[in-house]
């Protein structure tokens, strides 16, 4: 089959599978969550009728009151006496909001109230989101040698073939990321946040590090929480490091897929074609990496090579 035809056929298959996957998710979520929602709705209606029967408040006044309360709660302002904080816009909370904005996590638990704040959020994100991606890319580029290239080289020098070596390395890196950025933080969150279970903590970690940010679980909102500002700063550091490791994991998987021929089979761009690989000038200089890559082909000293012959993860000795 012609290469272009195969590429379009695969793209069509991807789109159809994506639509089917969305429909599958919709059916599962609807079947699981709809009964729970109906039950909660009935309970709220019964509670409302009970309140009206025991008071002199008319239904219209109650409706107006509830609309105001729910609207305020949407913006992070609670009327409850045991509300966790006096303001959602102190320095630590504002910094936490800015962090969720530029990392695209966006929990939505706190949102700008004014038109000026909304306008500034747009301008701030236009600059902050690309810059955050640039910083993450620069950090991952520096970590590629000690956490990806060097370990794979060690495995190869121990006698493993390139493909098993890269697969084993990816599996070990995956286990490391899961333990350090999902399991351990989930245990911490379930301890610090008294209303969270371990599953809630795992759910929060996954939703956050995948930048989904549903906002149903947000750290630092419990009533009477001690050292709240320090806690929020710690969560910000966790989010940045976690996003960095997730990006590193994806880069490692992409390079492994290149070596195993998966990207070629699916007609996808190879990793060195999408990011011009580490043989180009790095965002942050790394002299050690240039001096100690034992298993990468040396660069040409004169003219640049063709893209297909650039030294990369796939130039690991296959002998």
Image (cartoon, rainbow, N blue to C red):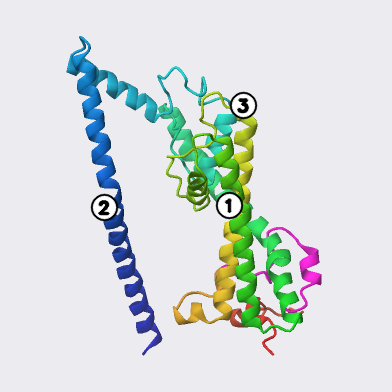
Per the image, is 155 magenta?
no
Q: Which residue is mark 3?
A: 226
Could you tell me residue 118's position as x and y percent?
43, 33
Labels 2 and 3: the sequence-earlier one: 2
Disc on res. 183? 1
> Is 288 placed above or below 81 here?
below
The answer to the question of whether label 3 and label 1 lie on touching residues, with beta carbons closer than 8 A, is no
Labels 1 and 2: the sequence-earlier one: 2
The answer to the question of whether label 2 and label 3 lie on touching residues, with beta carbons closer than 8 A, is no
Return the residue nearer the eye: 211 or 183.
Answer: 183
Per the image, is 282 magenta?
yes
Could you tell me residue 19's position as x and y percent?
30, 64
Could you tell me residue 93's position as x and y percent?
55, 30
* Mark 3 surroundings within 10 Å by alpha-carbon count, few (fewer than 14), some (14 through 19), many (20 or more): few
| Residue at 72% from the left image edge and 77% from the top image edge | 155
Magenta stretch bounds: 275-298
Could you tell me residue 239's position as x and y percent?
58, 46
Q: Main secondary structure of the magenta part?
A: loop
Residue at the outermost top position: 56
| Residue at 64% from the left image edge and 67% from the top image edge | 172
Q: CA distance from mark 1 to mark 2?
A: 29 Å
Disc on res. 31? 2
> Is 208 placed above or below 292 here?
above
What is the secondary structure assignment of the residue under circle 1? helix
The answer to the question of whether label 1 and label 2 lie on touching residues, with beta carbons closer than 8 A, is no
> Is 123 placed above or below 85 here?
below
Quadrant occupied by the N terminus: bottom left
Q: CA distance from mark 3 to mark 1?
A: 23 Å
């Amino acid at each position: 089959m012609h290469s272009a035809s195969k590429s379009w056929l695969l793209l069509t298959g991807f789109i159809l599978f994506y639509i089917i996957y969305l429909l599958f998710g919709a059916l599962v979520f609807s079947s699981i969550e709809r009964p729970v929602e109906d039950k909660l709705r009935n309970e709220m209606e019964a509670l409302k009728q009970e309140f009206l029967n025991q008071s002199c408040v008319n239904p219209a006044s109650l409706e107006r009151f509830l609309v105001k309360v729910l609207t305020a709660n949407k913006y992070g302002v609670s009327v409850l006496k045991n509300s966790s904080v006096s303001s959602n816009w102190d320095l630590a909370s504002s910094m936490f909001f800015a962090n969720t904005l530029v990392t695209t996590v966006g929990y939505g638990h706190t949102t700008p109230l004014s038109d000026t704040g909304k306008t500034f959020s747009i301008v701030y994100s236009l600059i902050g989101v690309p810059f955050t991606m640039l910083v993450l890319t620069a950090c991952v580029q520096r970590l590629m040698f000690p956490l990806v290239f060097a370990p794979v080289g060690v495995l190869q020098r121990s006698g493993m073939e390139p493909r098993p070596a890269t697969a084993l390395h990816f599996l070990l890196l995956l286990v490391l990321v899961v333990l350090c950025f999902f399991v351990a933080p989930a245990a911490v969150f379930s301890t610090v946040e008294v209303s969270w279970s371990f599953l809630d903590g795992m759910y929060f970690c996954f939703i956050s590090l995948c930048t989904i940010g549903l906002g149903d679980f947000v750290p630092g909102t419990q009533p009477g929480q001690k050292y709240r500002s320090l806690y929020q700063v710690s969560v910000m550091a966790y989010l940045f490091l976690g996003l960095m490791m997730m990006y590193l994991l994806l880069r490692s998987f992409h390079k492994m897929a290149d070596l195993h021929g998966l990207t070629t089979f699916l007609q996808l761009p190879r990793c060195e074609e999408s990011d011009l690989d580490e043989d180009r000038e790095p965002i942050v200089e790394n002299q050690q990496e240039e001096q100690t890559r034992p298993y990468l082909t040396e660069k040409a000293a004169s003219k640049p090579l063709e893209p297909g012959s650039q030294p990369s993860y796939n130039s690991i000795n296959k002998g």
